[in-house]
Image: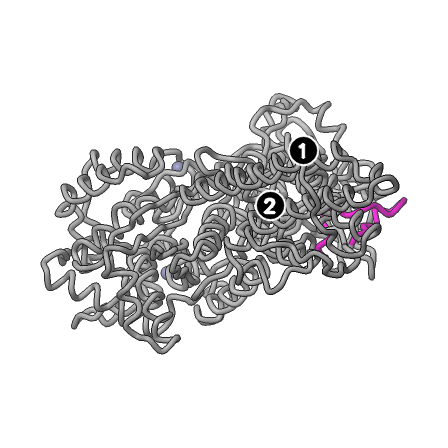
Amino acid sequence: MARILVCCAWPYANGPLHVGHVTGSLLPADIFARFNRMVGNEIVMVSGSDMHGAPITVSADKAKVPPETIANKYHEMHSKAIKDLGIKFDLYTNTHTKNHEQVTQDIFLRLLEKGHLDRKSTPQFYCENCKRFLPDRYVEGKCPHCGYERARGDQCDNCGNDLNAPELIDARCQICGSTPVLRETEHFFIRLSQFERGLTEYVEGNKHWRPHVKAFTLNVLKEGLQDRAITRDISWGVPVPVKGFEQKRIYVWFDAVIGYLSATKEWAQLRGQPDDWEKFWKDPVCKSYYFLGKDNIVFHTIIWPAMLMGYGGLNLPYDVPANQYMVIEGQKFSKSMGVSIDIPDLLTRFKPDVLRYYLAANMPELKDSEFTWQDFSQRTNSELVAIYGNFLHRALSFTYKNFGEIPPRGELDERDRQSLARISAAADGVKSSLSACEFRKSLKAVMDLAQFGNQYFDSVAPWSLVGTDKARCGTVLNVSLEICKALAVLAFPFLPFSSESVWKQLSMPGTVESAGWNALSMPLTEGAKLEKPVPQFAKVEVSGEGGEFQQFSALNLKVGKVLDIQPHPNAEKLYLMKVDIGRTITMISGLKQFYSPEDLKAKTLIIVTNLEPATIRGVKSEGMLLAAEEGDTLALLTPEKDLPAGTQVASGMEPGTRTVPFKEFQKLEMRAVRPVPGDPGMLDIGSRKVKAASASPVPDGRYAAFVLGDRAMIIQGPENVKITFDRDIPAGAKIR
Ligand SMILES: [Zn+2]
Ligand SMILES: [Zn+2]
């Protein structure tokens, strides 16, 4: 029996969980922990919501609520989604607890005492108007690398470069817009360079790590480690336990990794054995596994190990089987860009095991994988339903109909014996690949066994035996049910809900979970009554989910803010406009008869930014604004909530990168739509009602939508901000 600590990256409490979190860390951690519990290992699996940091205070400022309100709201949502998805933690807590604060401060003070922390003064932006320092997200300016106007103090969302706030050109305060000044401020830094040699030896010694994790880490170490600030000027987070630092907090990345330790301590306290955490952190026999996405590797293979080395006496990570990304239609999931598929929404539409199946079968273990709705429905229907669910249901329902109970096993022939041997072989395969964190491979072995079950069932043809040799028919069904039972056990780490349901249908005592791996050798109870079996999985229909709207992704739509309007020098009916779309462009528009220049001043528009540029009366137009027209009424498209200039409006699709000819644009149908009251699945497009591509209810109003035959998809920007109109316009009005 081994002892294992399963650590799962802490989801950030600033937005709902999405499929990236699940396939990247939650699900692999859960599969691994379930398997290890089954084989009798002593497991503790911990994680929680990461409650601190500037993104949460920014959201809180925007919503005019305290940061706790935002963090608690998402912590509760995370906890519920995790439970509903069957992710079984020993403790899912959060970083805003007294216990976590104490553990974090203890680590901080020990590192300070042992000379691993440095006090340094650095220049930081300070807003004299707001009278506060401006940590990363509180300052914006022009990116020094790509010229993007709205780069943040820590990162440019356009080119992806990490930034130091003082590098920003024309920096401005995010809160009040005024120009900040640089002011010296004192912070603690962790001297990572002290750990370079120890870390290199540690990483090189870990022969069992995934090659991409190891190579990436060694590369970072080879480039040399910079000291890193671990405190900052912010009021939300763990207080710095040093005199004179009362106004500062410990940096969120530093406190979040400590969560693994503090959560294990909390778990031990909650079960009334406060010292039990030591078995998982101090006893070198215990192996700790960390499940996370690749953007988190450095924190778990360098920074956290350095902190642990500095602290002393605690186990370093044994393995960090980091996953790559799951990309959606070619775009990396990024909460800050608002492109995600949220778990709470998905759980209202699909069984948890259906999501778990697809996200495990398509897990980005060694390279990026892609989430597309088409692939989701195809794999669910052709694998989970057609192979796995089908075998279980045909074996169980045929037995139920013809015997009503588990039939006795008579004499076995060669084929039967081979089948039973096939079960043992599958079990060995699943066990060895799950022990090695090879999740896709082990799920494949489970599915192969189900496929084998179908072949066996076809070859023994119980339907032709039932009338001629009922005893032999009972024997082959008994063997078939033996395969069903093995599937329930082997699939349990992946599909816990359906495994338990199959177990019950087989009239087995207790649960798979309690029986564990030994369930494989528990005999079927011959003569036990069967209840009428129900199919485990049904086909999913998602043909309308984005996939068919892909043709609209050719367009690159952005939020534009009008900077300036002039009459066109050579055309009476036209305006010449300067519009900020993250950069300034010149546009020609025919709005003169509908809008005065004053009406348009500072207006927020939706611009097609990648049409073939048109030259109109000698002036080149670099973009086209979108408007809906019906009779004499014209209404401009505008986001329902203010979005910064340059924001991508792509409805979760990857926006177009090539130039689109005007002819192609004209073929795309866009209209103003109105949700049909009382029927969230339908949209009114004037002449008729069409199906909404997403069933999420939308409040009454007029929205811009892509239309394709009998379906329509409401156009959205980040965080589901919909696009509406600046004037009343009837449903059905054409957008051009
Ligand atoms: Zn940039
Ligand atoms: Zn300010």
Q: CA distance from mark 1 to mark 2?
A: 25 Å
Question: Which mark lies nearer to you, 1 or 2?
Answer: 2
Write the residue at 11% across / 64% down: 113
**What kind of residue is marked 1?**
Gln
Identified by mark 2, the residue type is Tyr
Of callouts 1 and 2, which one flags the residue occurring earlier in the amino acid sequence?
2
> Quarter of the image containing the C terminus?
top right
**Is residue 702 rendered magenta in the image?**
no
Where is residue 20 shown, x and y percent of the image? 51, 46
Q: Which residues lie in the magenta part?
A: 681-697
Residue at 61% across, 54% down: 523
Q: Relative to 722, is 312 on the left or the right?
A: left
For this view, does 14 lie left or right of residue 127? Answer: right
Residue 60, position in %: x, y? 47, 65
Q: Residues within 10 Å of mark 1 (few under 14, many from 20)?
A: some
Q: Residue at x 36, y 37 (%)?
A: 210
Position of the N terminus, as image quadrant, is: bottom left
Write down the residue under mark 1: 550
Residue 347 shows in this picture: no
